[in-house]
């Protein structure tokens, strides 16, 4: 099953840090194919556009010795991982260190992306389902000396190397940063289309390109399911125009050597040479896909649940 909790590398050749004891064959194939092919107190009120993404916080001095990194210079800071961030439409990175009177230091990295969808995409690519999740931003988690969270178009990392600095202090800082960046954070709304029944918790992920190794599968949301012993992945593609979704289905049918003329709303089943059984359900500007789901009754049940959820959006 697809588990988007590995630090994976999109569209360039860099090392992939994956927990291979936990990862499944399906997830490994998806990551492999996707990866291989693929200052001033600026701004307005919280949640609005701003020049400075880092606020002043009472009790701390904000030190900003780093430059503002852009897509062209990000590799100077994170080297090989930069292209992965850029593939998620990264726009800028601001870094600051918060220092209190005792010399305790908390470093904050704020990555700004083109939209909340792309910020969520890079966030979930570095997240594990078994992380300790906390309520900060739209979603966040904590590890030893680290809090990561996503809020709006921002992916934020709060960290420290100071011995004895508590997790609560990092979480406090994360909440302050989140409130400054976005007063009302929420995950991308399209995630609400995924039915809860049988869904693996925190398995949702977003691929910006080359999903399953196909150039025509871009900006895809995915979640893993285990329904009465049948494990499968469901993916969602949404476009501005229905004609764009028709083109995606046509391209996939051509790849599978199936008749691609006259595609309209409906269901299409075929074998993907590299990924097994695929079922696509097309409805106007939405495509719902099933990977390795072989029971027609399960497809019908989940398609019906998706239809009901789409009516509420």
Image (tube, rainbow, N blue to C red):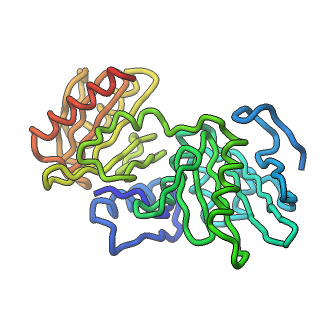
Q: Could you say which is closer to the camera, residue 37 or residue 237?
A: 237
Query: x, y (%) of residue 204?
Result: 39, 48
Q: Could you say which is closer to the camera, residue 201 or residue 252?
A: 201
Query: x, y (%) of residue 164?
Result: 69, 77
Query: x, y (%) of residue 106?
Result: 74, 65
Query: x, y (%) of residue 68?
Result: 80, 52
Q: Residue at x 32, y 56 (%)?
A: 2
Q: Residue at x 54, y 53 (%)?
A: 140
Q: Residue at x 21, y 44 (%)?
A: 278
Looking at the picture, does residue 266 appear above or below residue 140?
A: above
Q: Quadrant of residue 32?
A: bottom left
**Residue found at the very far bottom of the displayed protein:** 163
Instruction: Tally the marks.
Output: 0
Looking at the picture, does residue 247 appear above or below residue 215?
A: above
Q: Which quarter shows the C terminus?
A: top left
Q: Residue at x 65, y 36 (%)?
A: 183
On the rendered structure, is 16 left or right of 262? right
Q: Quadrant of residue 1?
A: bottom left
Q: Could you say which is closer to the camera, residue 56 or residue 288?
A: 56
**Residue found at the very far right of the displayed protein:** 40
């Amino acid at each position: 099953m697809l588990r988007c909790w590995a630090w994976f590398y999109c569209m360039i050749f860099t090392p992939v840090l994956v927990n291979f004891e936990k990862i499944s064959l399906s997830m490994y194939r998806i990551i492999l194919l996707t990866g291989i092919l693929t200052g001033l107190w600026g701004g307005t009120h919280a949640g609005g556009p701003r020049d400075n993404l880092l606020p002043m916080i009472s009790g701390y001095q904000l030190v900003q010795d780093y430059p503002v990194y852009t897509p062209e210079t990000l590799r100077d800071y994170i080297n090989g991982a930069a292209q992965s961030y850029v593939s998620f439409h990264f726009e800028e990175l601001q870094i600051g260190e918060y220092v209190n009177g005792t010399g305790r230091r908390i470093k904050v990295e704020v990555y700004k992306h083109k939209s909340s969808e792309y910020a969520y995409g890079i966030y979930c690519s570095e997240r594990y389902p078994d992380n300790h999740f906390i309520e900060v931003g739209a979603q966040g988690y904590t590890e030893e000396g680290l809090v990561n969270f996503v809020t709006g178009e921002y992916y934020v990392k709060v960290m420290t190397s100071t011995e004895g600095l508590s997790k609560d202090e990092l979480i406090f800082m994360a909440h302050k940063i989140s409130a400054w960046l976005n007063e009302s954070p929420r995950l991308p709304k399209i995630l609400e289309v995924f039915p809860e029944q049988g869904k693996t918790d925190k398995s949702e992920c977003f691929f910006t390109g080359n999903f399953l190794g196909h150039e025509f599968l871009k900006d895809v949301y995915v979640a893993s399911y285990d329904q009465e012993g049948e494990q499968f992945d469901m993916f969602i593609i949404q476009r501005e125009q229905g004609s764009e979704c028709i083109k995606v289905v046509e391209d996939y049918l051509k790849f599978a050597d199936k008749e691609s003329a006259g595609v309209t709303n409906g269901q299409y089943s075929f074998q993907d040479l590299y990924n097994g059984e695929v079922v696509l359900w097309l409805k106007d500007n939405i495509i719902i896909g099933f990977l390795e789901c072989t029971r027609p009754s399960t497809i019908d049940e989940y398609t019906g649940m998706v239809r009901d959820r789409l009516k509420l959006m």
